[in-house]
Amino acid sequence: QVELGEFGGGLVQAGESLRLSCVFYGSTFSLYVMGWFRQAPGKERELVAEITAGGSTFDADSVKGRFTLTRDHAKNMVYLQMNSLKPEDTATYYCAAKHRSTSEYAYWGQGTQVTVSS
């Protein structure tokens, strides 16, 4: 059973940086696409970025050029480096995993709060 654990959220000022980390347990990491989603109060959950086992990434338009998603296969970790943070980036961020043969994310972390003050 896949389990995910996130950490690294916090309160920062606009323009500052944060790095979110997610650890993957319970299966073969290289078989899974990893993603970060976020959900702000009153808004739907949205995909922020995702990365394949081979390192190909997709970034949402709202974070392109500011956020970078990487993965470390030796440590079964993914990292979301968030630079030039804006108040609109405030949300709960969730790490997620989907097997490379499926289209839906099936495994989710508990979420970590990111708050950006203006």
Image (cartoon, rainbow, N blue to C red):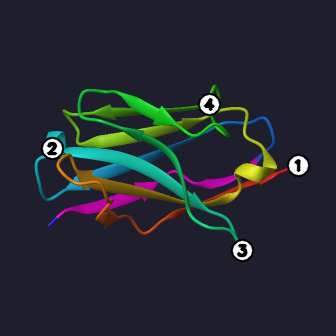
Query: Does residue 29 appear left or right of residue 116 in this picture?
Result: left
User: For the residue carrying disc 3, how many other residues have a C-alpha within 10 Å: few (<14), some (14-19), or many (20+)?
Assistant: few
Q: Earlier in the sequence, mark 3 or mark 2?
A: 2
Instruction: Work out how far the residue at label 3 is from the one at label 2, CA to CA, in angstroms.
Output: 34 Å
Q: Amino acid at mark 3?
A: Gly
Q: Amino acid at mark 1?
A: Ser
Asked if the residues shown at circle 4 and circle 1 are in contact, with their CB atoms under 8 angstroms apart, the answer is no
Q: Quadrant of residue 61?
A: top right
Q: Earlier in the sequence, mark 1 or mark 2?
A: 2
Asked if the residues shown at circle 3 and circle 2 are in contact, with their CB atoms under 8 angstroms apart, the answer is no
- Magenta region: which residues? 2-12
Residue lying at 35% horizontally and 27% vertically, measured from the top left: 56
Query: Can you identify the residue that label 1 sits on?
Result: 118
Asked if the residues shown at circle 3 and circle 4 are in contact, with their CB atoms under 8 angstroms apart, the answer is no
Placement of 111 over or under 84, stated as above or below:
below
Q: Quadrant of residue 16?
A: top right
Q: Residue furthest right?
A: 118
Return the x and y of residue 1 as percentages of the image width and height.
Answer: 14, 67
